[in-house]
Amino acid sequence: MADTLPSKDDNDYAVQIEASVRDAATGALWVHEDLVQVLKPWELEEHVSPVKTTECFGDVESWTHYVSRFSTAPDFPPLVTWNAAGLTAVLDYHVAEAPGRSQWLAKMPFVPAPEFAAWAQLADGRGRSQRVAIEALEDRGAEIVEPAAGELMAMLRTLRTTVNKSAQTELKPDGSTSVTYTDDKGISARGGTVDLPSEITIRVPILKGHVDDSGKPVVYELKVKLRASVGDDARLMLRFSIPNAERALEEVYADRVALARRLLGDGFDVLRAAG
């Protein structure tokens, strides 16, 4: 803290005092020539930094409970928004007297249910071979409502393809010959005929965490379009698509947002964000 130095006169001593002294253990700080204490012991440790956190929830009920519990409405209500990504509440208030210092978010993401995600991946409009398509439908057979899954698989297994190529020649007046090739492609059933359905009806949950009062997942009926085509190599290709997938998602989002508004009650505005 201080060094004692001998002066020119061996009987006198000069005292040199540090400009500041900090206790390495407690953090206490003294400054100036008189060592006035400006920080008390452990004062730095007692300082609380602004909140910086993001909490994610799996259902609307848990999310709204958290937002209601930790918001400071009506003085500083949180900014609550939603879009296709989910619900978000910005609880950006460290203290009521100094808002805006923290980064405090509460999120409830809209996560597709595994069943809906699997059908969306299958029904992307790309052509799939007969074997791949049948295996995929067998895996999801429990979700097929119409036609019955067993009947659908039986119909698809009986399909076979044909490609008949023919050529026509034409002799032109100048002596040259024009050749035109045509392909006659067809799909038929072994042992008879079969009417392939143009669409399949499935019943699946769309969002994770979307359950009814009894705790069971809420399911929706969707139409899956089925198209068959034959390639130049005589291979059968099957294509699936869900034309009303976007509309179904919008309906589910609207249902979840309506529930959030109802549970939050008055004093909370739930705004639609971009995206």
Image (spheres, rainbow, N blue to C red):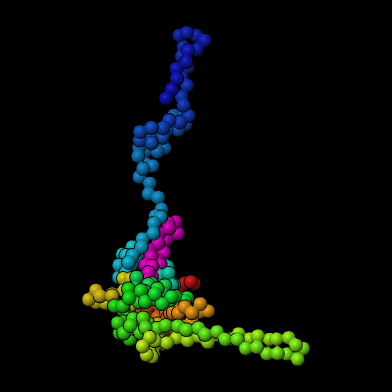
Tell me if 115 is positioned left or right of 235 in this view. left
- The answer to whether one can see residue 131 in this image is yes
Name which residue lies at 45% across and 8% down.
11
Name which residue lies at 46% across and 24% down.
17
Give the camera-side residue of 263 and 146. Answer: 146
Name which residue lies at 32% across and 76% down.
138
Give the camera-side residue of 263 and 239. Answer: 239
When asked about the image quadrant of residue 40, the answer is top left
How far across and down, in percent of the image, does residue 223 sit? 39, 84
In the depicted structure, whether residue 140 falls above or below residue 101? below
In the depicted structure, whether residue 161 falls above or below residue 173? above
How far across and down, in percent of the image, does residue 90 sit? 41, 64
Q: Identify the magenta region.
A: 88-113
Name which residue lies at 45% across and 20% down.
3
> Per the image, is 112 magenta?
yes
When asked about the image quadrant of residue 58, the answer is bottom left
Give the camera-side residue of 273 and 147. Answer: 147
Q: Residue furthest left?
A: 214
In the depicted structure, whether residue 265 falls above or below residue 15? below
When asked about the image quadrant of residue 190, the answer is bottom left
Q: Residue furthest right?
A: 174
- The answer to whether one can see residue 146 in this image is no
